[in-house]
C-alpha cells in the first residue's frame, strides 16, 4: 500500500482566516514532506520532517507552519495568507529520508485558493 | 548544485506508438536515485519508474523503460504502446538524502 491521503481536496479562504491542511500515511515511513506547486511548474519543497527533525526551506514565509503530531501525520497550518499563496499543496512521504530508500510517494494534493 | 533539465516542454505521440522523453542532470555525487513521475489532470504525482545510480541495468515497468547513461548524466523515459491514459505532465527527478530536485516537466499529448 503506497497511499498518502490529504484533506481537504479543495480549500477557499480569506486572508484573515486560519486553516489547516492534513496529511496522513500508513506505510511506516519516517520522512514526510510538504510541497507547493503553481500551475505548469514543478513542486517546490517547503518542509521536511524526518526522524522527528524539521527542516525548513528558508524561502517559505512564516505564515506557513508545519506540525507533526505523530509519525504518520503531518499538518500544515495556514494563517494570514496572501493571494499569491494560492496553489496546489502536495504532501509526500518516504521510507527513510536520510540517505536510504529515497522514493517519495505523493498524496492527491489540496487545491488552495486565497481570496 | 544539482540540476535537472527537461528540454522538451511538450510532446505529442500517436496512440499505440512509442515516445521518448529526455532528461539530463548534473551532480558530482556517485550514489543517488532518479525518478520519473507522472502528473495527470487529476493532479496526483504518480511514480512511474525509479533508477538507482549504482545499478547499471536499466529499470523497466511494463510499458515504461529508461535509458540510464550515468557517464553522460542522461535519464530518458521510453513509453511503448502509448495509451490515452498516458497523457499527463511528466517530471524527471533527482534525489539524494531527503532532497528531491524536479525538472520543469514535459507535457505529453496522446493523439487518438
Image (tube, grey):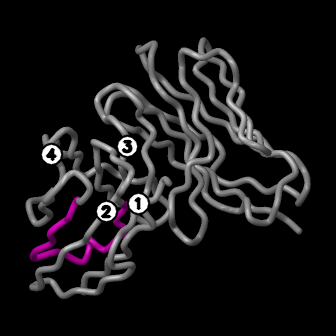
Q: What stretch is highlighted in magenta?
A: A74-90
Q: How far apart are marks 2 and 1 (CA)?
A: 6 Å
Q: Where's the C terminus of chain B, which quadrant?
A: bottom right
Q: Check contact, mark 3 vs mark 2: CB within 8 A.
A: no
Q: What element carries label 4?
A: loop
Q: Mark 1 lies on which chain?
A: A
Q: Distance between the residues labelled 3 and 4?
A: 22 Å
Q: Nearer the viewer, mark 3 or mark 4?
A: 3
Q: Position of residue A88 (x, y in %)?
A: 38, 68
Residue A77 in magenta stretch: yes
Residue A56 in magenta stretch: no
Mark 2 = which residue? Answer: A24
Q: Residues at marks 3 and 2, common chain?
A: yes
Q: Which chain carries label 2?
A: A
Q: Residues within 10 Å of mark 2 (few under 14, many from 20)?
A: many
Q: How crowded is mark 3: few (under 14 residues within 10 Å), some or many (20 or more)?
A: many
Q: Check contact, mark 3 vs mark 4: CB within 8 A.
A: no
Q: Check contact, mark 2 vs mark 1: CB within 8 A.
A: yes
At 25% from the left edge and 81% from the top edge, which residue is drawn?
A: A114
Mark number, residue A101: none
Q: Residues at marks 2 and 4, common chain?
A: yes
At 23% from the left edge and 45% from the top edge, which residue is drawn?
A: A48
Disc on the earlier residue, 3 or 2: 2
Q: Nearer the viewer, mark 1 or mark 4?
A: 1
Q: Where is residue B31 in the image (x, y as percent from the top left)?
A: 44, 17
Mark number, residue A4: 1
Q: Residues at marks 1 and 4, common chain?
A: yes
Mark 4 = which residue? Answer: A58
Disc on the earlier residue, 3 or 4: 4
Mark 3 = which residue? Answer: A94
Amino acid at each position: 500500500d503506497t497511499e498518502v491521503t490529504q484533506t481537504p481536496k479543495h480549500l477557499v479562504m480569506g486572508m484573515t482566516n486560519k486553516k489547516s491542511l492534513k496529511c496522513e500515511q500508513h506505510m511506516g515511513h519516517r520522512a514526510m514532506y510538504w510541497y507547493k506547486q503553481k500551475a505548469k511548474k514543478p513542486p517546490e519543497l517547503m518542509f521536511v520532517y524526518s526522524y522527528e527533525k524539521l527542516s525548513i526551506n528558508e524561502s517559505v514565509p512564516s505564515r506557513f507552519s508545519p506540525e507533526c503530531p505523530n509519525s504518520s501525520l503531518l499538518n500544515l497550518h495556514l494563517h494570514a495568507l496572501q493571494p499569491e499563496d494560492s496553489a496546489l499543496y502536495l504532501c509526500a512521504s518516504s521510507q527513510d529520508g536520510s540517505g536510504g530508500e529515497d522514493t517519495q510517494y505523493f498524496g492527491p494534493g489540496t487545491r488552495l485558493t486565497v481570496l | 548544485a544539482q540540476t535537472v533539465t527537461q528540454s522538451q516542454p511538450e510532446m505529442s505521440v500517436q496512440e499505440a506508438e512509442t515516445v521518448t522523453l529526455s532528461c539530463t542532470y548534473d551532480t558530482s555525487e556517485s550514489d543517488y536515485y532518479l525518478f520519473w513521475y507522472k502528473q495527470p489532470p487529476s493532479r496526483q504525482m504518480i511514480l512511474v519508474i525509479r533508477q538507482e545510480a549504482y545499478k547499471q541495468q536499466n529499470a523497466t515497468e511494463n510499458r515504461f523503460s529508461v535509458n540510464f547513461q550515468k557517464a553522460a548524466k542522461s535519464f530518458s523515459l521510453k513509453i511503448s504502446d502509448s495509451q490515452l491514459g498516458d497523457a499527463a505532465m511528466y517530471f524527471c527527478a533527482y534525489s539524494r538524502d531527503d532532497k528531491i530536485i524536479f525538472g520543469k516537466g514535459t507535457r505529453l499529448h496522446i493523439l487518438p
